[in-house]
Image (spheres, rainbow, N blue to C red):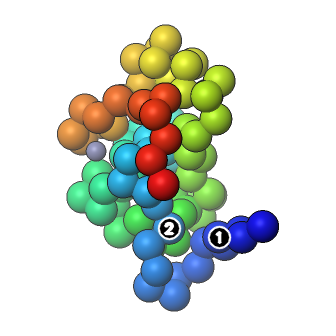
Amino acid sequence: MAEVKGSMGGRIALKESTIYLGDNGRAFCGHARCAGATAYYSGRDLSGAPVFPLEHPDDIRHALEFKIVCERCGKAPSLIVTP
Ligand SMILES: [Zn+2]
């Protein structure tokens, strides 16, 4: 069981293919330009709250239902999970 903890150690915390929700309701993909550097490297939003990945199929279905896409590039969550 590998658990990735958010840290500012310079490692990338987000997956580009995943859509994330910030604590202020912002939706973005894991691309550096869309997520912003803070979320991209730490997995946390500017407020320090962890961003929520839409990874579970139920979460993804909800996101698709409510048309939640990346605010910046328009990427939609996919039920096909890529590592
Ligand atoms: Zn994006």
Q: Position of residue 19 (x, y in %)?
A: 44, 41
Q: Can the viewer see residue 21?
A: no
Along the line of sight, the residue nearer the viewer: 19 or 35: 19
Q: Say which element carries label 1.
A: loop
Where is residue 10 shown, x and y percent of the image? 44, 85
Which residue is at a point 49% across and 29% down the rendered structure image? Answer: 79
Earlier in the chain: of badge 1 and badge 2, it is: 1
Q: CA distance from mark 1 to mark 2?
A: 8 Å
Q: Are marks 1 and 2 in contact (CB under 8 Å)?
A: yes
Q: Residues within 10 Å of mark 1 (few under 14, many from 20)?
A: few
Whether 49 is drawn above or below 4: the answer is above
Q: Three-letter amino acid code at disc 1? A: Val
Q: Quadrant of the N terminus?
A: bottom right
The residue that label 1 is drawn on is 4
SS for callout 2: loop
Kindly identify which residue carries mark 2: 13
Please indicate whether residue 41 sits to the left or right of residue 57 in the image.
left
Q: Between 31 and 27, which is closer to the camera in this rendering? A: 31
